[in-house]
Image (cartoon, rainbow, N blue to C red):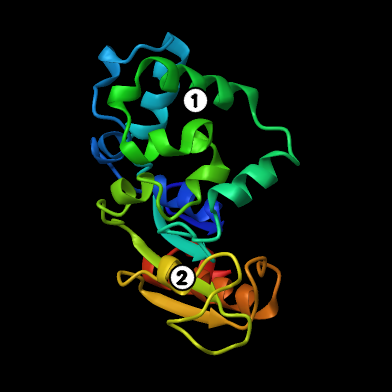
């Protein structure tokens, strides 16, 4: 496919966003002060860091739809909450080992915020925090394709002070969005009629603008 639309919910929206951007060294520099070649880590950890922080966009992705996406993190992800959640689930071993390698031999190369979070720094639980330096690097890179936001406010109708109970409006809102739809639901709203209707609207708009033969069917 050469004319793709990605629809991402929550942190899946961040993954979708990263398919379209060329971060250069902004993500790397937000987390680390030393280049890949000087880090005291195994080759597998170095390869993983390089793949996740120094990458190129996928040119076939032409539009994005974000559903309750934490573009600036969430203040709900405090250390205490992260630690409680991590005690209830099995954390990925490879990510834990990577965190341990980085922390044991490269403390001087890590962002101060990374050092403060310890082994949670490179886990999705920790990376949801609004204080994580990842967002500083991510938001320094413009989104080069048209994008749309669907944001929950739990029916309180109080944006911009609203929240979907997980992601506040200040994090899910993007000034650069081509459209923004507020829906009266909480964070897990992907199957709600208003959300489905808005996604369909954007997809139809995309077909019209791109002149796809599919619209003739």
**CB of mark 2 within 8 Å of CB of mark 1?**
no
Q: Is residue 127 left or right of residue 153?
A: left
Identify the residue at horizontal 39%, vertical 17% (top origin). 46
**Residue 109 horizontal/vertical position (percent):** 28, 25
Can you identify the residue that label 2 sits on? 149
Q: Can residue 211 be seen by looking at this rendering?
A: no
Q: Residue furthest bottom?
A: 157
Q: Residues within 10 Å of mark 2 (few under 14, many from 20)?
A: many
Identify the residue at horizontal 30%, vertical 30% (top origin). 32
> For the residues marked 2 and 1, what is the alpha-carbon distance in whole angstroms?
32 Å
Q: Secondary structure at mark 1?
A: helix
**Residue 59 horizontal/vertical position (percent):** 35, 44
**Residue 163 horizontal/vertical position (percent):** 54, 75
Q: Can residue 153 be seen by looking at this rendering?
A: yes
Q: Which mark is residue 99?
A: 1
Identify the residue at horizontal 52%, vertical 81% (top origin). 182
Query: Which numbered disc flags the more N-terminal residue, 2 or 1?
Result: 1
Q: Residues within 10 Å of mark 1 (few under 14, many from 20)?
A: some
Identify the residue at horizontal 44%, vertical 60% (top origin). 64
* Picture quadrant where residue 198 is located: bottom right
Q: Secondary structure at mark 2?
A: strand
Q: Residue furthest right?
A: 88
Nearer the observer: mark 2 or 1; the answer is 1
In the figure, 194 relative to 82: above or below?
below
In the figure, 102 relative to 43: above or below?
below
Pick the front one: 176 or 59: 176
Instruction: Point out the image quarter for the C terminus.
Output: bottom right
Pick the front one: 162 or 61: 162
**Residue 94 horizontal/vertical position (percent):** 59, 22
């Amino acid at each position: 496919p050469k004319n793709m639309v990605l629809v991402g919910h929550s942190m899946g929206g961040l993954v979708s966003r990263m398919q379209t951007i060329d971060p250069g060294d902004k993500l790397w520099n937000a987390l680390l002060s030393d280049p890949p070649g000087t880090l005291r880590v195994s080759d597998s950890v170095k390869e993983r860091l390089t793949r996740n922080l120094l990458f190129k966009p996928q040119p076939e992705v032409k539009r994005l739809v974000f559903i309750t996406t934490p573009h600036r993190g969430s203040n709900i992800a405090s250390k205490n909450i992260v630690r409680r959640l991590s005690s209830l689930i099995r954390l990925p071993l490879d990510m834990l080992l990577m965190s341990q390698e980085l922390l044991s031999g490269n403390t001087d190369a890590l962002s101060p915020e990374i050092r403060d979070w310890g082994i949670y720094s490179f886990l999705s639980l920790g990376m949801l925090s609004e204080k994580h330096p990842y967002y500083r690097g991510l938001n320094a890179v413009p989104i080069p394709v048209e994008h749309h936001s669907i944001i929950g406010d739990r029916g309180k109708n109080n944006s911009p002070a609203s929240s979907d109970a997980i992601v506040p409006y200040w994090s899910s809102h993007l000034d650069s969005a081509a459209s923004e739809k507020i829906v009266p639901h909480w964070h897990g709203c992907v199957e709600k009629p208003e959300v489905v209707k808005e996604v369909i609207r954007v997809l139809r708009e995309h077909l019209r603008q791109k002149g796809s033969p599919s619209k003739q069917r």
